[in-house]
Amino acid sequence: MLSHKTVINNNLNGGQVINNTTPVTGNWTEIRVITATVFTTLTGSPGITNVGSTSFPVGAVLNGRFTAITLASGSVVAYHAP
């Protein structure tokens, strides 16, 4: 149930679909993988560092504070921070 509530709360702030290799900057608190995804860059906290060449499966959820996303492949929804 908590997971569902998190989605509802994040949707109030809106989400952004990222599905290409163009670098994107913003302020997000959650990233949901909608097709298998590999990041070129994922910048944020706490302590998020090099995740390149790690494949994230459909349905994976990353929580934290994210400020820069570049995909090598795949697509995600990044939910805006409140």
Image (cartoon, rainbow, N blue to C red):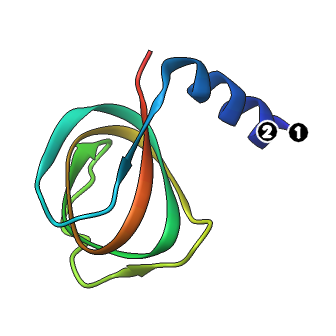
Q: Amino acid at mark 1?
A: Met
Q: Amino acid at mark 2?
A: His
Residue nearest the observer in this picture, 48 or 4: 4
Residue at 41 percent across and 23 percent down: it is 81
For residue 71, above or below residue 79: below
Q: Position of residue 55 (x, y in %)?
A: 39, 83
Residue at 49 percent across and 73 percent down: it is 35
Q: Secondary structure at mark 1?
A: loop
How far separated are the C-alphas under marks 1 and 2?
5 Å
For residue 81, above or below residue 35: above
Mark 1 residue crowding within 10 angstroms, few (<14) / some (14–19) / many (20+):
few
Q: Is residue 70 left or right of residue 54?
A: left
Residue at 53 percent across and 78 percent down: it is 57
Residue at 25 percent across and 84 percent down: it is 53
Q: Secondary structure at mark 2?
A: helix
Q: Which mark is residue 1?
A: 1
Q: Are marks 1 and 2 in contact (CB under 8 Å)?
A: yes
